[in-house]
Amino acid sequence: MDPAAYVEMDALEEHHWWFRGKRRLLAPLIRRMLSAAPSAKSEQRVLEIGCGTGGNLFHFSKLHPGASFVGLDFDPGAISFSKRKSERSDAAFDVLQGDGLKLPIATGSMDGALALDIIEHFEDDDAVCAELARILAPGASLVLSVPAWPSLWSPHDEFLHHARRYRPEQIRELVQRAGLEIQEQRGFNFLLLPPIWIVRRAKSGRAKRKPAEHQSSGTDFFQMPAFIEAAFDLIFWAEAALVRILPIRWGVSILVRAEKPKA
């Protein structure tokens, strides 16, 4: 990922409406991941690969103080951001530097794993999913999120060094090839899908016409006036309520919880 993206993420991820909304939608999946974990140990171990600047670890380690969270990232700059968040957290977490294709974690030792907007960065996404399946204990779960729909590809993806965006059937098949069984799969950020699709298509068109102007255009994340942030917050509250009663299949991203077979 572009080093500037880490600076941007660190500045925004605690307060920005998109990051807050995503954590709100992830929370039930992570809660069910921990509830289904097979470990009888007093402290369940959860690894997040591609932890970036540590925003998810900071939030979920406080939400689940009975679990032991560990973050892993390849980038030393990201590790520094994450360690600073751990130092000011009420529920400190560990951070490791390592490669997602060769995790420095014992086989079958993790009670859960998080891969939140990270596997799309790998050219060999099958290999990283196989590594995640390897470290999980039988009966443990992987919670992952990925950007959806190739038609949404834009300079935002290029700045973040994405290799692809996924169709729902592609991520389902990818997870199954790793030997994991999907328990839940749904769209995320589905209420905003139509306007985001329009904006992304327009940006892609401009980038093709004037590529030099869009080489370092940054992501689509930026701080907005408080009243707009509040409006987007309400949209995600509505989405969090709707997913409890409707099988949402569409969205700007895809969320999955998949389990490693017990036998």
Image (tube, rainbow, N blue to C red):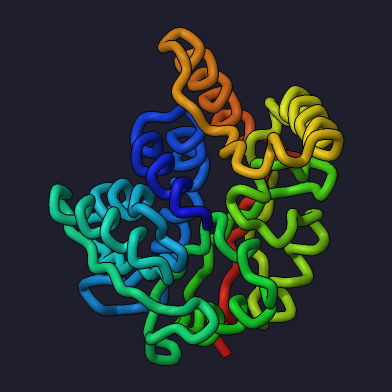
Residue in view at x 84 percent, y 39 percent: 208
Question: Where 186 sits versus 98, above or below?
Answer: above
The image quadrant of residue 137 is bottom left
Q: Quadrant of residue 144?
A: bottom right
Give the residue at the far top of this rendering: 227
Relative placement, left or right, of 145 versus 52 is right
Query: Which residue occupies the foreground of this view, 214 or 8?
Result: 214
x, y percent for residue 189: 64, 35
In this rendering, would 211 be left or right of 66? Answer: right
Q: Position of residue 86 (x, y in %)?
A: 20, 55
Question: 5 above or below 259?
Answer: above
Across and down, in percent, residue 96 comes to 31, 73
Residue at x 58% of width, y 90% of height: 263
Q: Residue at x 56, y 29 (%)?
A: 241
The mark total stands at 0
Q: Residue at x 51, y 40 (%)?
A: 22
> Is residue 96 toward the left or the right of residue 222 in the image?
left
Query: Which of 84 and 39 lies nearest the eye of the viewer?
Result: 84
Left or right of residue 157: residue 136:
left
Q: Nearer the viewer, residue 139 or 59?
A: 59
State the residue lying farthest toward the front.
212
Question: Where does residue 88 sit, x and y in percent of width and height?
Answer: 14, 48
Q: In front here: 162 or 195? A: 162
